[in-house]
């Protein structure tokens, strides 16, 4: 009788340990996907990258005026899928890196037609009218999505 109880006791312990190990394995296996994030792709068929060089980048008043106009454009524009406003990054200086611009705006559009509509949209035209006197150069890079 003692042997039967002892055997039963060890079987129960074995089953609990086994269940705990299986549960731990399952937990680790399902959470590993969260540790390694899947790549995120930019939304939109067309990426519209615009770089601005200001006339007087050290003039705080002019910089504030430009930023206000640019932020208004970004906030009021309903055509773009995604929006980004940035300044040059503090990345390593290399021959291939151009950090000479003052502001960068990146907008993505669902397609070429949407980008064309944006060019004639009142929000875009108002921005140009309000801010063109503040920049000395604008450079635009448009790219169409390719399959990855």
Image (cartoon, rainbow, N blue to C red):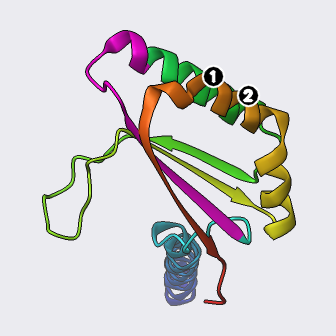
Q: Which residue is tagged 1? A: 130
Q: Is residue 100 above or below residue 146?
A: above
| Quarter that holds the N terminus | bottom right
Marks 2,1: beta carbons within 8 A: yes
Q: Is residue 90 left or right of residue 18?
A: left
Q: Is residue 66 left or right of residue 109?
A: left
**Which residue shows up at 66% across the image and 27% down it?**
129
Chain part drawn in magenta: 46-63
Q: Is residue 59 above or below residue 98?
A: above
Residue 111 seen in the current view? no
| Residue 118: assigned label | none
User: Is residue 73 shown in magenta?
Assistant: no
Q: What element carries label 1?
A: helix
Q: What element carries label 2?
A: helix
**Which residue shows up at 59% across the image and 75% down it?**
30
| Residue 126: assigned label | 2
> In the picture, residue 127 is in which quadrant?
top right
């Amino acid at each position: 009788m003692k042997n039967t109880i002892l055997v039963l006791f060890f079987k129960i312990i074995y089953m609990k340990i086994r269940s705990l190990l299986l549960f731990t394995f399952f937990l680790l296996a399902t959470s590993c996907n969260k540790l390694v994030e899947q790549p995120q792709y930019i939304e939109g068929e067309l990426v519209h990258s615009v770089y601005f060089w200001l006339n007087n980048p050290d003039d705080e008043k002019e910089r504030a005026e430009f930023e206000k106009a640019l932020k208004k454009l970004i906030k009021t524009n309903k055509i773009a899928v995604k929006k980004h406003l940035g300044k040059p990054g503090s990345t390593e200086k290399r021959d291939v890196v151009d950090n000479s611009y003052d502001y960068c705006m990146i907008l993505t559009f669902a397609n070429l037609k949407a980008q064309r509509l944006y060019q004639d949209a009142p929000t875009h035209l108002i921005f140009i009218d309000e801010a063109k006197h503040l920049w000395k150069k604008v450079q635009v890079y448009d790219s169409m999505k390719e399959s990855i």
